[in-house]
């Protein structure tokens, strides 16, 4: 693999290190690589920044003849910062990764079954511009995030015949981590929620991420880093309107069926003046979704531009599929 060259980036980038696997999951997946690889692809899609994924970092370590101890060496982190122009470094551990099957009734005569996926990671984000220096001073975000998804359809199995979910559960090890088939499983859905919750925490601790213009860009798919090209998330822009304003709150016509989620930022646009080109939309405010109330209804908190907002103004949000 050729040496990694420094690259200009549109904003601060991330380098994601391999995670420690502290889970009790028994299967073929190397969670210490697969989970951070998955998160790297999600970060790339959400923010459009350079994200250096863990396998790329490991290749760099091997090229230089370094041991895995380099992964915890701030001097190596500084080298990555200088060569790749990435500002933030994400380290973590997989603390939980599980798929559970629940049944009621008799397996041999007739039973109902349901499945649940759960994943959790502990993480820390360091600001590499503060290294060399003390690690506590460089720390910008840390915590534990979790994702869960339960299939409560309770499929009926008769006379021991396997349902489609049972087949999926028992053949889970044959599915490629991060593939479309994986994403359709309960553990895939849990990983998706995990990634979303991680970005919500990052945006709380690193507010500049919320202000990026990426939320309203029309994209089919962002290209992921070199070792995550098989994990693809697709982004699209959904459009709605301001329905009702009261104090610092606003209702908008985007909801569950539009793909928006609690904590997401929504941009408000004023009507364009006649003769203005399509690319000259005027952004007048920013909202944060606090509650998703229905298929096409959400309650938001006004974050900026309160004095400029009016009913029927267009709102836009970028969702990841």
Image: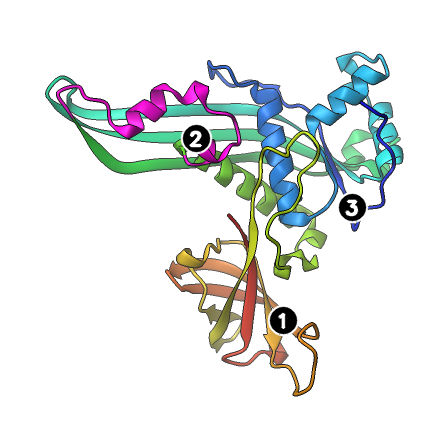
Left or right: residue 273 versus residue 113 is: right
Tell me the distance, in whole angstroms, between the alpha carbons under discs 2 and 3: 30 Å
Place residue 274 in its image quadrant. bottom right
Where does label 3 land, which residue? 12
Check the picture and name the quadrant holding the N terminus. top right
Give the residue at x 61% y 48%: 221
Q: Mark 2 or mark 3: which comes first in sequence?
A: 3
Graded by Cα atoms within 10 Å as few (under 14), some (14 to 19) or many (20 or more), the crowding at tag 3 reads some
**Callout 2: helix, strand or loop?**
helix
**Residue 301 inside the magenta-drawn segment:** no
Contact flag, marks 2 and 1 (Cβ < 8 Å) = no
Residue at horizontal 44 percent and vertical 68 percent from the top? 253
Would residue 267 be visible to someone looking at this image? yes
Tell me, yes or no, if residue 72 can be seen here.
no
Residue 168 in the magenta stretch? The answer is yes
Proximity of marks 2 and 3: CB atoms separated by less than 8 Å: no
What secondary structure is found at the residue carrying circle 3?
Answer: loop
Which segment did they paint magenta?
Answer: 158-184
- Residue 187's label in the rendered image is 2
Mark toward the start of the polypeptide (2 vs 1): 2
Residue sitting nearer the eye, 287 or 67: 67
Q: How is the image coloured?
A: rainbow
Foreground: 280 or 31?
280
Residue identifier under label 1: 285
Query: Is tag 3's residue or tag 1's residue first in the polypeptide sequence?
Result: 3
């Amino acid at each position: 693999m050729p040496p990694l060259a420094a690259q200009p980036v549109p904003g601060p980038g991330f380098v994601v290190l391999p995670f420690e696997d502290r889970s009790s999951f028994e299967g073929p997946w190397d969670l210490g690589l697969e989970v951070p690889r998955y998160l790297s692809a999600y970060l790339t899609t959400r923010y459009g920044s350079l994200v250096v994924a863990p396998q790329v970092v490991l290749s760099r370590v091997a090229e230089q003849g370094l041991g895995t101890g380099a992964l915890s060496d701030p001097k190596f982190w500084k080298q990555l910062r200088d060569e790749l122009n990435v500002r933030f470094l994400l380290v973590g551990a997989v603390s939980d990764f599980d798929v559970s099957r629940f049944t009621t009734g008799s397996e041999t005569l007739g039973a109902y079954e349901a499945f649940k996926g759960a994943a959790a990671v502990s993480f820390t984000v360091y600001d590499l511009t503060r290294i060399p220096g003390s690690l506590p001073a460089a720390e910008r975000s840390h915590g534990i995030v979790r994702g869960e998804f339960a299939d409560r359809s309770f499929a009926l199995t008769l006379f021991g015949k396997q349902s489609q979910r049972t087949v999926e559960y028992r053949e889970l090890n044959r599915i490629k981590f991060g593939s479309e088939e994986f994403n359709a499983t309960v553990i895939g859905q849990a990983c998706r929620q995990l990634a979303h919750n991680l970005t919500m925490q990052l945006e709380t601790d690193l507010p500049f991420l919320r202000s990026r213009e990426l939320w309203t860009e029309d994209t089919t798919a962002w290209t992921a880093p070199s070792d995550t090209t098989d994990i693809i998330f697709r982004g699209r822009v959904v459009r709605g309107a301001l329905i009702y304003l009261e104090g610092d709150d606003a209702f908008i016509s985007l909801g569950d069926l539009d793909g928006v989620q609690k904590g997401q930022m929504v941009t408000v646009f004023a009507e364009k003046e006649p003769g203005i080109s399509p690319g000259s939309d005027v952004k007048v405010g920013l909202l944060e979704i606090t509650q998703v109330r229905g298929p096409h209804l959400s309650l938001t908190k006004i974050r900026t531009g309160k004095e400029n907002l009016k009913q029927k103004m267009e709102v836009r949000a970028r969702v990841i599929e």
